[in-house]
Amino acid sequence: MERKQLFRLCHHCSCLNESEEEILRCTKCGKGFLPINYFEKIRNRVQQAAKEGGAEEFPSAIFSPINGLIVFW
């Protein structure tokens, strides 16, 4: 089975963080990162709440994703 390596660059201190699991904080300065696939996770949570409580669907026109680079290998 292949292992995945995740890399995240901290825009606060320029530290390159590397891990096999999702990186949520910079190892050098402690600045928090948004989760990978943040908007997909939020959209799923809102849609689940809508099914359970009858709320409106996720307003995707208001919350557009942040464009960036995510590399898995």
Image (cartoon, helix red, strand yellow):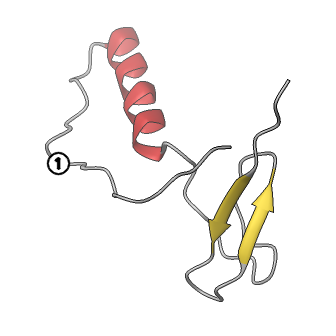
Q: Is residue 23 visible?
A: no
| Residue found at the far bottom of this picture | 13
Q: Secondary structure at mark 1?
A: loop
Q: Which three-letter amino acid code belongs to the residue tagged 1?
A: Ile
Q: Position of residue 56 (x, y in %)?
A: 21, 23
Residue 73's quadrant in the figure?
A: top right
Rendering quarter of residue 18: bottom right
Instruction: Name the residue that disc number 1 marks.
Output: 62
Q: In the rendered image of this protein, does residue 45 appear above or below residue 38?
A: above
Find the residue positioned furthest to the left: 61
The number of discs equals 1
Nearest to the observer: residue 67 or residue 26: 67
Q: Which residue is located at x 80 percent, y 82 percent?
A: 28
Residue 2 place in picture, x, y as percent: 81, 30
Does 65 appear above or below 40? below
Residue 61: x and y in percent read 13, 43
Residue 53 placed where, x, y %?
Answer: 35, 14
Which residue lies at the image location 35% right of the left edge and 10% below the top edge? 51
Neighbour tally class for label 1: few under 14, some 14-19, many 20 plus, Cα within 10 Å: few
Residue at the image point whose x is 81% and y is 73% from the top: 27
Quadrant housing the N terminus: top right
**In the displayed structure, does residue 33 sit left or right of residue 50?**
right
Residue 67 appears left or right of 63: right
Q: Is residue 58 visible?
A: yes
